[in-house]
Image (tube, rainbow, N blue to C red):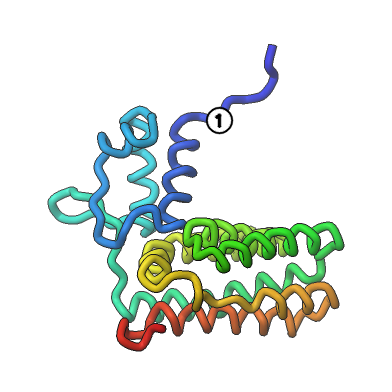
Amino acid sequence: MNSQTKIPEHLTVYSQLKEMILLGRFAPGQALTIFGLAEEMGAGTTPVREALRRLTAEHALTSLENRRIIVPELSEKDISDIYFLRLIVEPELTRQSTKNMTDTKIDQLRRIDAQINEALDHGDVVAYLEGNNRFHFAIYETAQSQVLFQTARSLWVQIGPSLRIVCGRYGTANMPDKHSELLDALSRGDENAAAQAMRDDLAQSHLLISAPPAHRI
């Protein structure tokens, strides 16, 4: 008998849908329906309904007065506020992770970064976004700070669709990448330099996503 406990379907659907939003699978303003998602994900309508309810409560989705559920369209103020928090939370996670960093973890991060560079070279937006997500959260989980980790995750889910639009429109050539500096600082165990490299990486991302289209290159 298999002793492994099966993960309830509603948790699986919730995690998958949250990941799809984070990676920009849905565009800002796009309406999501229970039956459409159930068919696309091969899931039951009840777990999809529960996932939508949870994600709406977490502000990853927005419920309108007519009960339609859409992916939020962020205003300039929304984006500014999200990055205000990201620039506090994520450098601090990076700083804390430095104390727990190992050679094995550094090697893992270098492998992920190599995959990111390959995606950038080939203009592969999906691979870039997936790799960038794995790179950052491999660092953040090492901090062993659950509150800050979950806060960062929530902020990434909110900004994901907007970042995907920028990547899709302008390609990967100008995507921020301070990963080399960050890896060097983590390898040295330099908490302040690692936090600053992460701050610089995020600041570049903010500049790109908030710039008027005519000024994006």
- Residue at point 31% right, 59% down? 27
Q: Residue furthest front?
A: 122
Q: Measuring from the top left, give residue 87's x and y in whole percent.
A: 55, 79
Q: Is residue 101 left or right of residue 163?
A: right
Rendered image quadrant of residue 195? bottom right
Eyeballing the image, is 64 above or below 167?
above
Eyeballing the image, is 7 above or below 37?
above
- Residue at point 74% right, 64% down? 110
Question: Which residue is more in the foreground, 216 or 16?
Answer: 216
Question: Which residue is more in the foreground, 167 or 145?
Answer: 167
Q: Measuring from the top left, give residue 126's x and y in whole percent.
A: 48, 57
Q: In this view, does 176 lie to the left or right of 163?
A: right
Q: Is residue 115 left or right of residue 215?
A: right
Q: Measuring from the top left, give residue 175's x and y in whole percent.
A: 51, 75
- What amino acid is at disc 1? Ile
Q: Residue furthest top?
A: 1
Q: Is residue 112 left or right of residue 128?
A: right
At mark 1, the secondary structure is loop
- Residue at point 55% right, 77% down? 176
Residue assigned mark 1: 7
Q: How many labels does the image show?
A: 1
- Quadrant assignment for the N terminus: top right
Eyeballing the image, is 190 above or below 140?
below
Local packing at callout 1 (Cα closer than 10 Å; few below 14, some 14-19, many 20+) is few
